[in-house]
Amino acid sequence: MKKSLQVIGGAALLLWTLTGLMAWKSTSDQIHITIAEEESATQGPNPIALLTDQVGTLQEDLRGLTSALSENFELLGTALDAQTGGDGALLDSMRADLASLALNSAGEGQTRATAALDQRLARVEGLLQQVLAANEDAAERERLATRFAEQERIREAARRKEDARLAAARTEQELARQETQAATDAVQAEKPRRGFLSFQLPSDDFTFDQRQRFGVITSLSRVGFDAKSTLHDFTGVSEKAKGQIIVNLAHPEYGIEGELRVPAASLDTALEGRDEEMHRVLGVERFSEMTFVPTSFEATRIDPEAQEFEGTIHGDMTLHGKTRKVAMKMKGSIDASRRLVVDGEMALKMSDFGIKPPNKLGMIKVEDEVRVWISLRARPSALATGEN
Amino acid sequence: MGLPLHNSRWAVGLLAILMAPACIAPSVLEAENRAVELSTANYGWRPATIDDLQGLFGSKEITGSAATALTKLYYWFESDGSYTGAALFAGSPPRFETLSGTWTLEAETLILDNSEPATLSATDEALRLRGAEGEVILVREQVQ
């Protein structure tokens, strides 16, 4: 059955194909196909003339466009040259294209010109788009730069204004502090005490715990030494001590400075001949002054309530032209007259300072070691501005 | 017996030399005496009279709280009850302050203008003024 159907189908397809071939054969002789391309061209307006007109119009437009764009390109070129070298090269290329375009459009054949014009116009259009884009970018950059500069200027102005405000505030604070201090000082200075013998005295408020100057009161001070000899012990005393010390008695660890000066010739042993010998061995004409410069104070007891202290003062002593480090035990207090009262004592050897102990014929011989002492009174005073 | 005369002279001379230093009194200042003694000495004070307040006086000692500020005082008293004074105030540098006015003395109380009264004692050459703020001993000064 299946095979029968295949045979029938094949016979039908063959019959259909033969019928088609017969029909095509019978009609092929009656149909003519003509290529009418040239016939239709000769029947309308002259295409060359039309193209010439169009090219002429286009040339005029291009000249105008070239002229207008040249000016703009000059301006753009100046701006863009400054921005990027790539943009400048692009403009150069565009100028060359325009020049070439103008030249070609005037002298070459119309067919070639048309094709070239199409090509160049497309390129010009592309270049114009690039230029416009670049121009817009430049304008945007310039706008952003201007905006940024303006913002920067505003920020700078604001910063300067803030700096000025802070400086003014600091100045005002400092002035206020100075005024407060001045007012306090004035109140302290002007705080009248009961007139003593008609003189108005400043406040006698004394503060133990503050750094201040103590000026040695020469008339109430003594320095000296005790010496031993084979004959008699004796003491040499000077009442010409001068100097000052700057210290916070409650906190001497904060630092101590000053000096004590004693004229060597002022030492007196109460015996004229002995004094002469002493001055000779001290070389008072050459080394006229004995000095002590404190460098630190090592406190062993400080009693701010009782206004007393004890400890060891360290410093440099210069005697007979030689300076040696020494340490002297001392104690001090504030008396009823608000004066610093200091007493101290230490042992030293004359030979350490190049002093040869006096020796008279081997019979009267002074021991090398002597005890040096101080008994000072000093008046307190505030430190001047700038001192510390 | 004994030494010849010339030998005796040598012996005396040697003894004199050896003994001479022993004649020199020790001159050691005891530790408790090292400080300058403030005036508690007996000047022989007596109550002052108007006659004591004449002439120039300068301070020898100032004690008490006034000593904090005052380092030196001078007064010139006139018998007509006027005076002028100068005070050297401590400082860096020190400064003088001067004033003039009148004084009155009633019993032992001296009043300079409107200041606090002071107890006045005197010797022939000195004045002592005691007040709430200290004590001043003034000694007579010679005018050049």
Image (cartoon, coloured by chain):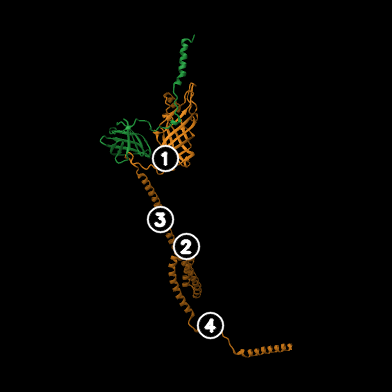
Chain colours: A orange, B green
Of the residues shown, which amino acid type is indicated by label 3? Arg
Parent chain of label 1? A
What residue sits right under mark 4 in the picture?
A38
Quarter location, residue A290: top left
Residues indicated by labels 4 and 3 sit on the same polypeptide chain: yes
Quick one: label 3, few (<14), some, or many (20+) residues within 10 Å? Answer: few
Of the residues shown, which amino acid type is indicated by label 4? Glu
Can you tell which mark lies on residue A165?
A: 3
Say which of marks 1 and 4 sits in front: 1
| Helix, strand or loop for disc 1 | strand
Can you tell which mark lies on residue A213?
A: 1
Quarter location, residue B101: top left
Q: Residue furthest left?
A: B80
Say which of marks 2 and 4 sits in front: 2
Looking at the image, is A130 positioned above or below residue A38? Answer: above
CA gap between label 2 and label 3 equals 40 Å
Q: Nearer the viewer, residue A194 or A44?
A: A194
Q: Return the x and y of residue B6 as percentages of the image width and height.
A: 46, 11
| Helix, strand or loop for disc 3 | helix
Q: Return the x and y of residue B95 as percentages of the image width and height.
A: 34, 39
- On the question of residue A76 being in view, the answer is yes
**Mark found first going from the N terminus, 2 or 4:** 4
Residues indicated by labels 2 and 4 sit on the same polypeptide chain: yes
Parent chain of label 4? A
Q: Quadrant of the N terminus of chain A?
A: bottom right
Of the residues shown, which amino acid type is indicated by label 1? Arg
Residues indicated by labels 1 and 2 sit on the same polypeptide chain: yes
What residue sits right under mark 2 in the picture?
A83
CA gap between label 1 and label 3 equals 39 Å
CA gap between label 1 and label 2 equals 72 Å
Parent chain of label 3? A
